[in-house]
Amino acid sequence: MIMRHMRRWVTGLLLLLVILFMPQIWLWITYKDLIHKQIESTPHREFAIIFGAWVNEDHSLSDITQERVEAGSRLYKSQKVEKLFVAGDNRSNEQAEEMARYAVENGVNSNDIVIDKLGVDTNYTCKHFAEIHLEAILITQGYHLPRTMLMCETSNINVIGLSVDKLGILKSRGDNIFQIYTLRTWRMFREAVLTWSFILGIYDRLSTEAETLVRPSE
């Protein structure tokens, strides 16, 4: 009797996990050929969009944010893009401006940076960019790209992605294997929840709270 209930519980849990991650699997299959893992293989576009992430209280960039901006700067200096659209929630330690400042310090001409101080979440960033251009390279980590590409395509932007975590920018992605895989699992779960919320039309209702529902480190 106990084993029967246990099997039902395990089967139910597995079914829930399949349902939860189905959109993520579909998005990965849909966009995998549009996601680049090297600067050299990335096609030229006029704009690249750098999505906002955590900025510390002392206005230094978190590792994940630095990785995005560094990747954008490398694209620019490699002449793969002509302009950077830097987005962030400026209520959070002047996020967008600090990201733009870092890009300038890394060789990007300030005249070639468009700052979106109201990029409070991924979908808002896509909507704001769509007001000025409809083609871009999306710059963010691989786990974030499928949802980002879906949201920007919904705003009628022709997109390709650059998976910045494949560029070897960060020396370390965690203190130990347990921490690294715990964080990866958390991010997969987070992306699945946010993707479902977007598909079901809940994401926009939550507005700025959508991206901060589960936010330990973006």
Image (tube, rainbow, N blue to C red):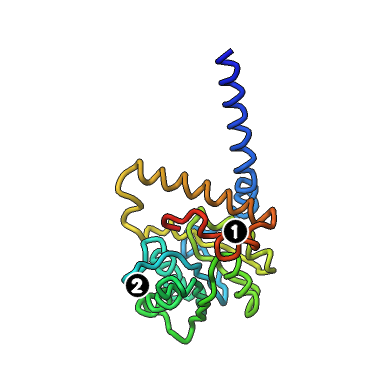
Residue in the image at 58% along x and 21% along y? 7
Residue in the image at 60% along x and 48% along y? 24
Which of the marked residues, 2 or 1, is nearer the chain's N terminus?
A: 1
Question: In terms of secondary structure, where does tag 1 sit?
Answer: helix
Judging by the rendered image, the residue that carries numbered circle 2 is 59
Amino acid bearing label 2: His
Instruction: Decide: few, some or many residues near mark 1? Use Cα within 10 Å; few <14, some 14-19, many ≥20.
Output: some
Q: Name the image quarter holding the N terminus.
A: top right
Furthest residue in direction bottom, as rendered: 111
Q: Is residue 49 above or below residue 33?
A: below
Q: How many marks?
A: 2
Q: Which mark identifies residue 13?
A: none
Q: Name the image quarter holding the C terminus.
A: bottom left
Q: Quadrant of residue 108?
A: bottom left
Judging by the rendered image, the residue that carries numbered circle 1 is 34
Question: Could you tell me residue 124's position as x and y percent?
Answer: 60, 69
Left or right relative to 132: residue 111 = left
Q: Do the residues under discs 2 and 1 have CB atoms within 8 angstroms?
A: no
Amino acid bearing label 1: Leu
Left or right relative to 97: residue 8 = right
Left or right relative to 156: residue 5 = left
